[in-house]
Image (cartoon, rainbow, N blue to C red):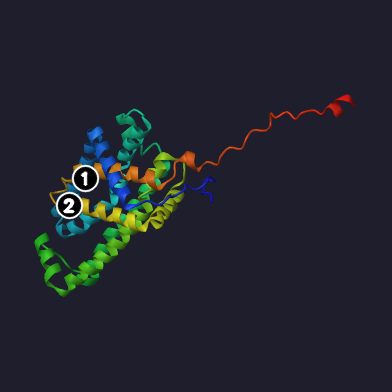
Amino acid sequence: MTSISGKSDPVVRPIKVADIAEALGQGLRDFQAAPLYGLAFGGFYALGGIIITLSLTAFGLVYLAYPLAAGFALLGPFVAIGLYEVSRRREAGERLSPRAIFGVVTSRGEIGWMAFVTLFVFIVWMYQVRLLIALILGLNASFGSFGEFLSVLLTTNEGLLFLAVGNCVGAALALVLFSLTVVSFPLLLEREVDFVTAMVTSVRAVVTSPGPMIGWAATIVLLLAISALPYFLGLVLTLPILGHATWHLYRRLVEPIAAEMPEELPDTSATVLPISRTATRS
């Protein structure tokens, strides 16, 4: 098969659960080897969550803090692009420089399209939250505090229905975006492919190893949820490790470029055929 760009599609290979543990270990080592980059990206991610939460509080929309915190994790793959680049450069033995790491997004146009896809799903996520609030809790639903909103969710039939439907819809959206992006961003970082091919390859990777990949998605959700509880501060450490680990998992999921190239045929252009004595005498 060939991609839209006319090049062969990347070759996907299956992984095991043990690969996830190994990738996390490599991610931790990358973070320890280049902590400043990890802290910078993790700090930016955490600061974004804090600012958005404070803004919701200021505008009286504090009840959106929970769905926003859950949806905020959807932006993680894009924010972690610089971390993928750190791991790629360390693996290739290339020098790390702030200009190369922080400028990687602008240096590859297809990454911008993937960022648009990610942002679009995040907007759909927030829209469905507002829609479900209107349909289930009422068009004029308003809550003075997060505690009041939480009380409605846990003590009323409408609130429990909202939790059930909202979490199911949210989980479906998260799974779709995970499938589209888990391999896409690292692939676009490493190779000259279009973003559609990257998304197709990412989905193929999930389908090829459904058990381990669902396990990886659950690991991400669990670690990000725990890290977001203390005012998003835990993300400063969690995001770098997960970002670096994602790169190493990608390297296990997709065949290296050299392995995808067909073996070269022997060069026979310079072969000299022996001249028979009979032909010479004639």
Q: Which residue type carries mark 1?
A: Thr
Q: Secondary structure at mark 1?
A: helix
Label 2–label 1 contact, CB within 8 A: yes
Q: Secondary structure at mark 2?
A: helix
Compare residues 203 and 110 and report the one nearer the observer. 203
Compare residues 95 and 110 and report the one nearer the observer. 95
Q: Which residue is mark 1?
A: 238
Q: Which residue is mark 2?
A: 226
Residue lying at the far top of the rendered structure? 281
Residue 279 in the image, given as x and y percentages of width and height: 86, 28
Residue 62 in the image, given as x and y percentages of width and height: 15, 57
In the rendered view, tell whether residue 229 sits above or below residue 134.
above
Q: Which residue type carries mark 2?
A: Ile
Residue lying at the far bottom of the rendered structure? 157
Residue drawn at point x = 61 percent, y = 38 percent: 265
Label 2 Cα neighbours within 10 Å, binned few <14 / some 14-19 / many ≥20: few
Residue 190 in the image, given as x and y percentages of width and height: 41, 39
Question: In the shown orientation, is residue 268 left or right of residue 169?
Answer: right
Residue lying at the far front of the rendered structure? 277
Label 1 Cα neighbours within 10 Å, binned few <14 / some 14-19 / many ≥20: many
Residue lying at the far right of the rendered structure? 282
* Label placed on residue 142: none
**Mark count:** 2
Q: Quadrant of the C terminus?
A: top right
Question: In the shown orientation, is residue 158 left or right of residue 148?
Answer: right
Residue drawn at point x = 49 percent, y = 48 percent: 9
Quadrant of the rendered image containing residue 42: top left
Q: Could you tell me if residue 34 is visible in this image?
A: no
Question: In the shown orientation, is residue 170 left or right of residue 229?
Answer: right
